[in-house]
């Protein structure tokens, strides 16, 4: 089960109380107090593990608590520290304060371990309270409570390429064709009810992660359909692939502008994200004269039709567009490419073209950091 948001109350352990004890040994006249200190309470530690992909292991849980510290003992023996609680979350998890709504932490790196809440200090034993006036103290400190906070975990998937399109546009078919993901595929809308991640291998040394989210409809940024619930999963993607359906009753320009509008309404970052365009289902539509529609679409984007490079080994007959790698304009798509996931038309070309786009974005990020 895919779960991407949970609410929990996290509590660090309470410190153990100090001990009230007196040294009583044969032939020891001035024994005095020897109560040890209580142990410190256990911490809450957040651990980022990329072997975990959802928050489903928190299902049914409302509160998580670290162990309390143990009590101090006689002979000035300290109590044992309480066992810390390691809370494992997938990369891309945000820790949000339930009360204020503030983002407390953004956990993105595999292997990160952060002490989120500290356990309470153990109480002092009665040996600390001996003085010239009170040589037989009969009291010790209780342990201090650990930190407690009501939080919400929100998972935002981390991927290199996010697929964006209307329902039933072929996103699931594409990700199953290019990657190791196995989503449900059917001929009706909203077959994808949860986000899917897939690893796309380019060659022995290169790969990238692709994310498929439920289809976006007009008004998704206002809560219509499933888009609002899962749009956050493409917030972190390095680039987007707009999937425009050649067989859809909506004109190409209308599909594109609607998707751009919903993304912009949801997030200003998504509105300026690097992107490319795939024209899907050209297997069933190429017999019709769509060249004029596609050229009009390219003109609307401010592009011109240019021959593809040999690198992509294109098999399609419809017009395609590729930007020059060294004159990359972020405001325009890196490429516009007709594809067919069913017949595998241009899917290999798409695999390599997306790899180049991802590498370009990675290079830009490395240069800016």
Image: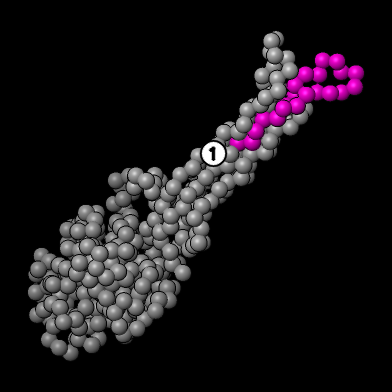
On screen, 264 above or below 39? below
Write the residue at 54% across / 38% down.
146
Instruction: Report the side of 289 relative to 22 (left or right).
Output: left
| Tag 1 secondary structure | loop
Q: Main secondary structure of the magenta part?
A: loop
Residue 93, horizontal then vertical, whole percent: 41, 54
Is 18 colored magenta in this rendering? yes
Q: Which residue is mark 1?
A: 146
Is 212 colored magenta in this rendering? no
Magenta span of residues: 15-37
Residue 225 in which image quadrant: bottom left
Residue 67, horizontal then vertical, whole percent: 61, 45
Q: Farthest residue in the front direction?
A: 138
Residue 2 in sight in this render: yes
Instruction: Report the side of 187 relative to 20 (left or right).
Output: left
Residue 216, horizontal then vertical, whole percent: 25, 70
């Amino acid at each position: 089960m895919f779960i991407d948001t949970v609410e929990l109350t996290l509590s660090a352990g309470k410190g153990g109380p100090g001990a009230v004890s007196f040294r009583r040994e044969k032939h020891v006249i001035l024994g005095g107090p020897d109560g040890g200190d209580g142990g410190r309470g256990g911490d809450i530690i957040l651990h980022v593990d990329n072997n975990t992909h959802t928050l489903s292991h928190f299902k049914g849980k409302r509160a998580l608590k670290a162990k309390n510290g143990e009590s101090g003992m006689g002979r000035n023996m300290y109590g044992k520290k309480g066992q810390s609680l390691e809370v494992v979350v997938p990369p891309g998890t945000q820790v949000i304060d339930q009360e204020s709504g503030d983002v407390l932490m953004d956990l993105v790196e595999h292997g990160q371990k952060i002490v989120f809440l500290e356990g309470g200090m153990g109480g002092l034993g009665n040996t600390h309270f001996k003085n010239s006036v009170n040589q037989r103290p009969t009291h010790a400190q209780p342990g201090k409570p650990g930190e407690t906070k009501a939080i919400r975990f929100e998972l935002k998937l981390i991927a290199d390429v996010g697929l964006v399109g209307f329902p039933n546009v072929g996103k699931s078919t594409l990700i199953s064709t290019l990657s190791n993901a196995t989503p449900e595929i059917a001929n009706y809308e909203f077959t994808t009810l949860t986000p899917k991640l897939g690893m796309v291998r380019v060659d022995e040394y290169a790969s990238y992660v692709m994310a498929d989210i439920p289809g976006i409809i007009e008004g998704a940024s206002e809560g219509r359909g499933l888009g609002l619930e899962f749009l956050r999963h493409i917030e972190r993607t390095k680039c987007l692939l707009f999937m425009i359906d050649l067989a859809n009753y909506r004109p190409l320009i209308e599909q594109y502008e609607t998707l751009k509008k919903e993304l912009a309404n949801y997030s200003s970052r998504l509105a300026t994200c690097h992107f490319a365009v795939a024209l899907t289902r050209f297997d069933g539509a190429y017999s019709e004269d769509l060249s004029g529609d596609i050229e009009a679409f390219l003109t609307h984007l401010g592009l011109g039709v240019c021959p593809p490079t040999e690198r992509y080994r294109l098999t399609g007959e419809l017009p395609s567009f590729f930007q020059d790698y060294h004159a990359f304009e972020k405001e325009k798509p890196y490429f516009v490419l007709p594809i067919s996931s069913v017949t595998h038309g241009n899917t290999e070309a798409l695999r390599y073209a997306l790899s180049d786009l991802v590498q370009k974005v990675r290079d830009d990020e490395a240069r800016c950091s």
